[in-house]
Image (cartoon, rainbow, N blue to C red):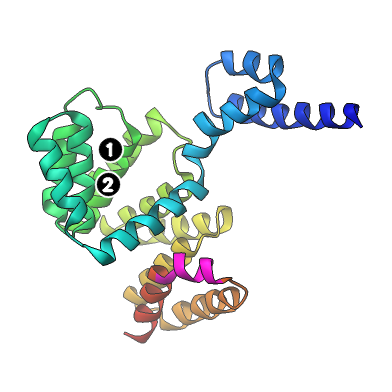
Amino acid sequence: MPFLGLGLHVLIALFFAVHAMRHGKQMYWLLILFSFPLLGSIVYFVVEYLPASRMQRTAGKVANAAIGFIDPEREYRAATEAYDLAPTAQNKLRLAKAALDKGQAADAVGHYRDALKGPLASDPELQFGLASALLAAGGATAGNEALQALQALRATRDDYRKDEVAVLTARALAADGRQAEAQQAFEDALSRYNTVEARARYIAWLAQQGDAAGAQRQWDELQQAARHWNSHARSVNREWMRLASDAVRS
């Protein structure tokens, strides 16, 4: 039995070692993982694996949504106060995210652009946020500028939030008028990640293109999948179900 436990620890360490190599992590992680199989794996999980995982992003979105429902202005006020007290790049990033969540997309674009001029100029979160804000704000050049931001993001971290970046790229292509490429990008995002957001965004795009039959087919598939969700999944995906439902009915 002790050998079985030791083998499991090594297998877990090996899993994280493969993750580290695939995602370009520092080589010292390999030393830590195999020198201390159990402790090293726990540390790697907390420091590297969990922050980039969809699980943490989902939990954060649920928590933020709950806070926003109780007090919609709370985070924006706090972010503004924090930036007024200490106009750092991190606080500018927080203010940009709060502005975007509040629906002030044009302000968010300005904040993201300002933050990109500072020490966080190569931060993928900033590039992702800028692309999101540009598409939310709209405008003749929004799609092209969002694509440029996403290109800069991939040049820095091509493993960053791949599922969401794929959907954002499809939306940016659509906003730039490149509809055939947008459709291919949506379908690629679905085949690779099959997230609820990807399907909901695709349904909305199909409806905008006048493909009511295609949108309905995708909506039927989404509803079929939703029948197997638990209460947590239904809560997390409520926004995307509403988006898809409204698109089909419009």
Mark drawn on residue 11: none
Quadrant position of residue 15 = top right
Front-lying residue, 25 or 229? 229
Apparent side of residue 123 relative to residue 201 in the rendered image (left or right): left
Q: CB under 8 Å between callouts 2 and 1?
A: no
The amino acid type, in three-letter code, at marker 1 is: Leu
Q: Which of marks 2 and 1 is nearer the N terminus?
A: 1
Residue nearer the viewer, 201 or 76: 76
Q: Which residue is drawn at 44% across and 77% down?
A: 215
Label 2: few (<14), some or many (≥20) within 10 Å? Answer: many
Q: Is residue 74 above or below residue 28?
A: below
Task: Measuring from the top left, give residue 27's x and y in whole percent.
Answer: 57, 14
Q: Quadrant of the C terminus?
A: bottom left
Task: Report the disc number at residue 126.
Answer: 1
Q: Determine which of the numbered discs, if any, sits on residue 131 in the image.
A: 2
Task: Please state which of residues 199 and 7 is positioned toward the viewer in this rendering.
Answer: 7
Magenta-drawn stretch, dominant element (helix, strand or loop): helix
- Hey, which quadrant is residue 17 in on the image? top right
Q: In this view, does 150 lie above or below 19?
A: below
Give the label, 2 or 1, closer to the camera. 1
Is residue 223 located in the magenta-colored stretch of the structure? no
Residue at x 62%, y 74% (from the top left corner) = 228
Q: In the image, residue 211 lies at what x, y percent?
A: 40, 78
Residue bounds of the magenta highlight: 231-238
In the rendered view of the protein, which quadrant contains the N terminus? Answer: top right
Asked if residue 102 shows in the view, the reply is yes
- Magenta run includes residue 233: yes
Q: In this view, does 75 lie to the left or right of 239?
A: left
Residue under the image location 61 percent in, 30 percent down: 42
Side of 9 relative to 221 (left or right) = right
